[in-house]
Image (cartoon, helix red, strand yellow):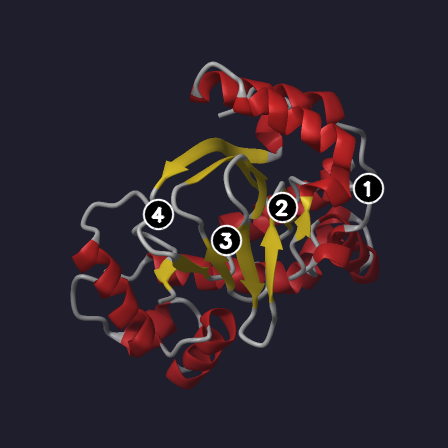
Amino acid sequence: MPRPPLDGLIDDLYYLAGVPPYARLTLPPMPAALLIVNLGAPFRIRAGTGSETAEYADGCVVTMPTRALEFGYPVPTRSVGVHFKPWGPAPFLPMPAAELCDRPVPVEQVWGRPAVAELRDRLATADGPHAMLTLLEEELRRRLRETAGLGLVRHTSSVIAATGGAAAIGDLSVAAGVSSTHLARRFKELIGVTPKRLARTHRFAATVFAIDAAGPVDWGALAGGAGYFDQAHFGHEFRAFTGLTPTRYIEVRRRFLREHPGHVLDSWPLPAD
């Protein structure tokens, strides 16, 4: 966990090295954003089933997605990265987050090629993972800037998260003393999506995390407990978020558990091959 004030923007920094469990992994949408600084061979990302695959050599920035991302990793892979809170990348971006929605961009497009080349150089020659993460944290601290509306978006997002996406969006704008239009505009600027979309993502993520893939699943009870209108509504939402039916999702989840028991990634990414 980074020190303040970065702790209000970031969930964690990480180091990834070695052979991934699968050559391609699908990452369903979640209420989070991502920065990857790549130190190995290029990796590939496909944003949505109808999208083309793009290659990233230096790394990428991913604001909060609305559809599944497919990652293709080289073997071996090596990178450092940041798991941001949904609003976390905003103080480090030169453009509104909405411009990057479902469109991962190379890090050099955000920070410039010379700066990223120097950062990758320093990371690659650092003395071990801890030194690398310290370097990345220092880089983020140096680039941190004041961002208009961040307090409003952070507070409102935190309320949405605390209710598992069940908060009434109209009530949130009233409580914040701003119009719903102003709140939606700030969310689009700093997160890339509206408060309503963030709430949908929180509700879906909380519901999926509650599934025990190792046992039988009562889909009707799960959908009702999460506040979905009915099981059909939940199934539609499931396909919209993951590209899979709930039944197919469980099959893939069980495959991951079976082939990689106890793996650190076994709670969210899915095999894509």
Label located before the other in sequence (4 or 3)? 4
Q: Looking at the image, which residue is at 68% across and 47% down?
A: 106
Q: Position of residue 208 (x, y in %)?
A: 37, 62
Q: Are marks 2 and 3 in contact (CB under 8 Å)?
A: no
Which of the 4 image quadrants contains residue 169?
bottom right
Mark 4 or mark 1: whose residue is earlier in sequence:
4
Disc 4 to disc 1, C-alpha distance: 32 Å
The crowding category of the residue bearing disc 2, from other C-alpha atoms within 10 Å (few below 14, some 14 to 19, many at least 20), is: many
Image coordinates of residue 28 in percent, x first then y, are: 47, 62
Residue 163's mark? 3
Tell me the kind of residue under disc 2.
Cys
Q: CA distance from mark 1 to mark 2?
A: 14 Å
Q: Residues within 10 Å of mark 3 (few under 14, many from 20)?
A: few
The amino acid pointed to by label 1 is Pro
Task: Pick whichever of labels 4 and 2 is earlier in the sequence.
Answer: 4
Kindly identify which numbered label has been placed on residue 94. Answer: 1
Amino acid type for the residue under numbered disc 4: Pro
**Numbered tag placed on residue 60 in the rendering:** 2
